Image (cartoon, rainbow, N blue to C red):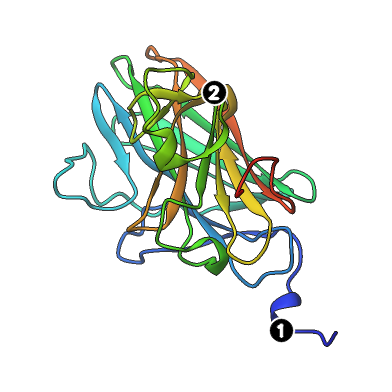
Amino acid sequence: MAERYEDQAKGIRIIPGQWRPHYPWEHIAWISPSWPSQDYIWLDSPEAIFTDQGLLYLSHINPPIPQLFENLPKVPWTEIEGGIRFERTLPNGVSFGQKVTKAGEDAVALELWIRNRSQGPLTNIKLQTCSYLRAIKEFADYTMSNKYVHVAGRGWTVWEEALKVEGEPGSVKLGWRGGKKIADKPMLLVLSNQGSRCASMTWFEDTGSLVGNSKHPCFHADPVFKDLEPGEEATIRGEIRFHAELPEGVGG
């Protein structure tokens, strides 16, 4: 079979990216899949940091959601072994950062940290971490029917069908920073439209909720942090993984 342009770029690549140049304070990492592809997931992480002090950080402007600090300076990514990292300090002394590094042939390791150098405690810390899909065509369908979560007794289930499950049979919520505890695995899958393969996202035991958006193609595993007193810090770890074969029970 003749070689194609699309097949020339192979393997995971992690590079500093950009989404919305009018918001220079956002932190975007471009991540290519492990199979041959010219496309990239745009990881917007953290997209937002919500706390009881207020919305500490938002990667863009959303007028209905006021944030404590606007028009922040640009903080560039730094290249490190296997990937990239950044750290930002907010005007109140809170700092946060992330590493995005290659972890084998089919996985990307994520590491997020928050250091509380403010004068008060940080409580009820919930983040949004968005894997934006518009720039990777095989995952970019405007639908929720390609998003799967795992439900006890049902296996892998389309997100919208899982949302109909009665009670709270799981430990992970479905919804934007809330919802019912339905999923029993802290992982969200998105299926490719170009073959029997998928990508997944998780923050392991620190995953608070799983969600996507049919009008804005993305998928989220959104993490939570423990409460942080002044002077304390915490680190969580997650993963984006590319699966060349679908897990059993997905897409049937």
Earlier sequence position, callout 2 versus callout 1: 1
The quadrant of the image that shows the N terminus is bottom right
Say which of marks 2 and 1 sits in front.
2
Type of amino acid at the residue the image marks with label 2:
Asp
Residue 88 x/y as whole percent: 43, 41
Residue drawn at (75%, 49%), measured in percent from left and top? Answer: 106
* Residue 201 position in % (x across, y down): 57, 41
Could one spot residue 157 in this view of the protein? yes
Q: How far from the left and from the top, in percent, is residue 102? A: 72, 48
Find disc 1 in the rendering and name its residue.
Answer: 5
Instruction: Look at the numbered disc 2 and give the secondary structure of its residue.
Output: loop
Q: Is residue 96 left or right of residue 12?
A: left
Identity of the residue furthest to the top in this view:
229
Residue 164 placement: quadrant: top left
Can residue 211 be seen in the rendering of this structure?
no
Residue at 32% across, 39% down: 57
The kind of secondary structure element at disc 1 is helix
Residue 184: numbered disc = 2
Distance from disc 2 to disc 1, alpha carbons, whole Å, reads 41 Å
**Picture layout, residue 162 above or below residue 194:** above
- Residue at figure coordinates x 62%, y 44% from the top left: 250
